[in-house]
């Protein structure tokens, strides 16, 4: 079972992507907890492309579901950029000194079962996997 | 994102319904920041399915603003995916959360 979407690199696309993922999850009886986790990570990665991918003309998202596992792939044709290369943020600083830079990618790293970046045929490609179960 | 405002025990309570993410957080910001005043604001998160880092950015801004204004700021009824994001980001240590609105206003 899979879903593929090709969208312009703009904020509205993030909403369209998340709505489509929610629809897919409902249709295929994917537990709400797994769907929520997937959507958080899709939001982080797609927002990253929309805000930082220089020269991208589109983003392409696909979701594949096999029993036990969800695989989400996000590609864009912008300049090469590996978001996973960012340093981990300080998650222990008190409120006054807190900054949220890098937090999105930190969530991706912590919540996905696996995540990898590659640049291939002029495209940035991020692939992440996560369990399709409630925990 | 739908936001409904009410008052409980002198505190403002904002009931949020929807996602707090890249697309919705900027629109929610103006409305929520306007409600932030002493004695305090409680966000009822019962119907918030998840919060991404864009939502965390807004919540952190609100926590800082509340501190500056001497207002209380608390969250209520974090759903599992929201709680998970809070724990991973360390936000559970900087923004108080409670099981119910009554617990939050009594704290």
Image (spheres, rainbow, N blue to C red):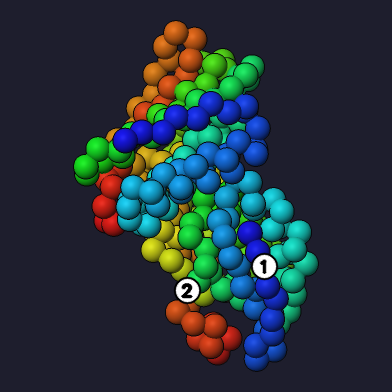
- Point out the frontmost of discs 1 and 2: 1
Q: Give the vertical position of B35 relative to B85 (above or below).
A: below
Q: Secondary structure at mark 2?
A: loop
Which quadrant is the N terminus of chain B positioned in? bottom right
Confirm or deny contact between disc 1 and disc 2 (CB under 8 A).
Answer: no
User: How many numbered circles are shown?
Assistant: 2
Q: Which residue is mark 2?
A: B77
Mark 2 neighbour density, 10 Å: few (under 14) some (14–19) many (20 or more): some
x 57%, y 55%: residue: B20
Q: Which residue is mark 1?
A: B3
Front-most of B8 and A87?
A: B8
x 27%, y 45%: residue: A131
Q: Give the vertical position of A65 relative to B27 (above or below).
A: above
Residue B73 seen from this side: no
Q: Give the vertical position of A69 relative to B62 (above or below).
A: above
Front-most of A112 and A96?
A: A112
Mark 1 neighbour density, 10 Å: few (under 14) some (14–19) many (20 or more): some
Residue B3 at x, y percent in the picture = 67, 67
Q: Which mark is residue A120?
A: none
Left/right of residue B77 with respect to residue A68 in the rendered view: right
């Amino acid at each position: 079972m899979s879903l593929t979407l090709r969208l312009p690199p703009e904020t509205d696309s993030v909403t369209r992507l998340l709505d489509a993922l929610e629809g897919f999850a409902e249709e295929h009886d994917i537990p709400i907890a797994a769907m929520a986790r997937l959507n958080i990570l899709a939001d982080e990665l797609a927002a990253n492309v929309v805000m930082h991918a220089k020269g991208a003309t589109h983003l392409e998202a696909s979701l594949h579901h096999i029993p036990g596992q969800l695989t989400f792939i996000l590609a864009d044709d912008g300049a090469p950029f590996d978001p996973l290369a960012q340093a981990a943020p300080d998650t222990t600083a008190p409120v006054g000194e807190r900054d949220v830079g890098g937090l999105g990618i930190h969530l991706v790293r912590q919540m996905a079962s696996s995540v990898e970046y590659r640049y291939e045929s002029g495209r940035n490609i991020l692939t992440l996997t996560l369990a399709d179960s409630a925990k | 994102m739908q936001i409904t405002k009410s008052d409980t025990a002198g505190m403002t309570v904002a009931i949020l319904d929807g996602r707090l993410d890249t697309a919705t957080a900027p629109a929610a910001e103006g409305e929520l920041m306007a409600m932030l005043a002493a004695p305090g604001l409680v966000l009822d998160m019962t119907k918030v399915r998840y919060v991404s880092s864009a939502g965390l950015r807004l919540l952190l801004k609100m926590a800082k603003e509340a501190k500056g204004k001497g207002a209380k700021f608390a969250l209520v009824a974090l759903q599992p995916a929201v709680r998970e994001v809070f724990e991973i980001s360390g936000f559970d240590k900087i923004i108080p959360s409670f099981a119910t609105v009554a617990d939050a206003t009594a704290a």
